[in-house]
Amino acid sequence: HEIEKYTSVPIIGEIVHEKSKTPLVIGLGKRTFVAEQFRKLRTSLPYIGIVGEKKKLLITSNASGDGKSFIVANLGLSLAMVDKKVILLEFDLSNPTLSDKLEVTTINKGLTDYLRGHAEPEEIIRRTTVNDNLFVMPAGSLPEKPSELIMSDRVQDLMEFLTPLFDYIIVDTAPVGLLSDAYVLSTHCDATLYVIRHGHTSKVSVE
């Protein structure tokens, strides 16, 4: 009710706090309450325009610790489990945590290498071990000026390369309250999910 009070932006999903030892709370045979909530979130994507050729989804939040990378990883896995080919882009170049959540450890090159012109897209795509349909593009080595790097024309080239290859492209970006990265990347995407965490996200940030 508080969220509805402060903004008219539609709420399309609610995920309970999960005290799990693993960041992945959805999987084959998992019928927990939180897993079911991710399935509901998956079915809600067409309501915000993510359907068919509209497949590029940006996920951000206000600050670190809001849970956006947790949402990215589990929503991506949820989509992969229904035989959709999904790629997750670790565009949080300031504090990347997505690769760790997906246990992607062998990272030779990443998005920063591609944006600098030191790698091609096919060199930085990694298949995850959690599902054959789930892929990730790791962040790579952390740059000194991530916001300037993200303004590269190569971001649009990357989206054009990935669009015919995948059913869903999910972009994990830096918190919008700290950096401008999400504003820049949103121009390349079809819709944005803004993650709000109970007891953590400030009311001013929601506005």
Image (tube, grey):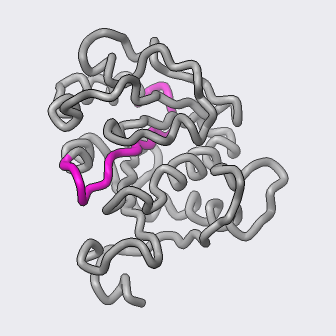
**In the rendered view, does 147 fall on the left or right side of 29?**
left
Between 41 and 59, the one lying in front of the other is: 59
Between 13 and 139, the one lying in front of the other is: 139
Residue 122 appears in the figure: no
**In the rendered view, does 44 fall on the left or right side of 178?**
right
**In the rendered view, does 105 fall on the left or right side of 48?**
right
Q: Where is residue 198 in the image (x, y as percent from the top left)?
A: 47, 76
Residue at 54% x, 53% y is 70
Q: Where is residue 89 in the image (x, y as percent from the top left)?
A: 43, 35
Residue at 80% x, 48% y is 28
65 w.r.t. 168: above or below: below
Tell me where the magenta segment starts and ends, as one range: 163-180
Residue at 36% x, 37% y is 91
Asked if residue 142 lies in the magenta stretch, the reply is: no
Q: Position of residue 88 (x, y in %)?
A: 48, 37
Between 154 and 199, the one lying in front of the other is: 199
